[in-house]
Image: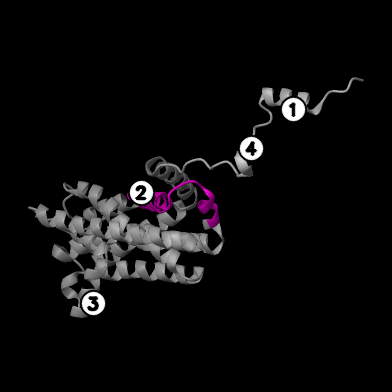
Amino acid sequence: MSAVSAEAVSGKVRERGAVRPRPVGGEPAPLAPRARLLPALSAVYRAQLSRARVARIPLLFVATFQSVGIMILMRGVVDGGDEARAVVAGSSVLVVAFVALNLLAQYFGQLRASGGLDHYATLPVPPAAVVLGAAGAYASFTVPGTAVTAIVGSVLFKLPLAHLWVLAGVIPLAGAALAGLGAALGLLAPRQELATLLGQLGMSAALLLGVLPASHMPAPIALARDLLPSTYGVEAFARSFDTHPDWLRVAADLGVCAGVGVVSLAVATWAYRRAAVR
C-alpha cells in the first residue's frame, strides 16, 4: 500500500469543495443578513393564519354565536333607532374584540410563559414582522364572524344593508387597534394567567361599553367608553346605518382607530423586544 502525503490528500479534498477555509484569525463566518420586513411579515402572517384556521375555528363560532345571542336578547328591549344601531354595531365589533384582543393576549402570554419567544428570537426576522404578522392573522380571522353578525343584526332590527361595505374599513382598522392592545397585554403581563385575565377584561369592556347605547350611560362610564379603541369602530359602523351617513365623521372615527392601531402595535413591538431578550 503506497503512502500518500497529508498535503496531497488535503489538496484533493479542498479541490472537491469538501473543506472550506476558515476565515483569517479563526473567527466564525458572518451570519446571513436579516430578512426584510415585508417578506418576513408575509411569511409570519401566512404561518399564523394557517395555525389560527385550524385551532381557532371553534372559538370563532363561539364569538359569533355570542354576538348573535346578545342581539336576540336586546331585541326584546330595543325596537329601533339609535339604540338598534348601537346594538348591531357593538355586537359586530365584539367579534373582533373577542379574537383580536382576547385570544391574541392569551396567545402571546402563553408564548412568553412557555419560552416560545426564544424560537422567534432565533429567526432572522424583524420583531415588527412577528407582532404585525400575528396581529394581522388574528384580525383577518374575524372577517367571517363579523360579517355574519352584521347581516343577521341588520335583518333582525330592520336596518339597511346598503352600507355594510364600511366593514371593509372597520374590521382591519379596529382589528389593528385591538390586536396591538391584545399583543401588548400578553407580552407585558408578568404571568400567563394575568395575560388571560387582562384579555378577558378587555373583551368584557368592549361588550359592555360597545353594545349599550352611549346616551344611556353615566358620565364616568361614557368617558371610559371614549378611551376604548373599539368604540370608534362601533361609532363608524353605527353611523353607516343612517339614511344619509356623515362620511366625514365615519372617516374621522376610522382615523382614530388607525392612529391607535399604529401606537398599540408599536408598543407591542417594543414589548416583544423586551420580552425576547429576557
Give percent across and percent down for residue 269.
39, 57
Residue 259 occupies which quadrant of the picture? bottom left
Mark 3 burial class by Cα count in 10 Å: few <14, some 14-19, many 20+: few
In contact (CB < 8 Å): disc 4 and disc 2: no
Along the line of sight, the residue nearer the viewer: 17 or 246: 17
Of badges 1 and 3, nearer the viewer stands: 1
Give percent across and percent down for residue 224.
25, 74
In contact (CB < 8 Å): disc 3 and disc 4: no
Three-letter code, disc 1:
Ser
Name the element at disc 1.
Answer: helix
Of badges 3 and 4, nearer the viewer stands: 4
Three-letter code, disc 3:
Ile
Disc 3 or 2, which lies upstream in sequence? Answer: 2
Residue 126 magenta-highlighted:
yes
Name the element at disc 2.
Answer: helix
Along the line of sight, the residue nearer the viewer: 153 or 121: 121
At horizontal 20% and vertical 67% (from top left) the residue drawn is 78
C-alpha span from label 1 to label 2: 57 Å
Q: Which residues are magenta?
A: 118-144
C-alpha span from label 4 to label 1: 14 Å
Disc 3 or 4, which lies upstream in sequence? Answer: 4
In contact (CB < 8 Å): disc 3 and disc 2: no
Q: Which residue lies under the disc numbered 2?
A: 140
In contact (CB < 8 Å): disc 1 and disc 3: no
Name the main secondary structure of what is drawn in magenta: helix
Of badges 1 and 2, nearer the viewer stands: 1
Disc 4 or 1, which lies upstream in sequence? Answer: 1
Q: Which residue lies under the disc numbered 3?
A: 221
Q: Which residue lies under the disc numbered 1?
A: 10
Q: Which residue lies under the disc numbered 4?
A: 22
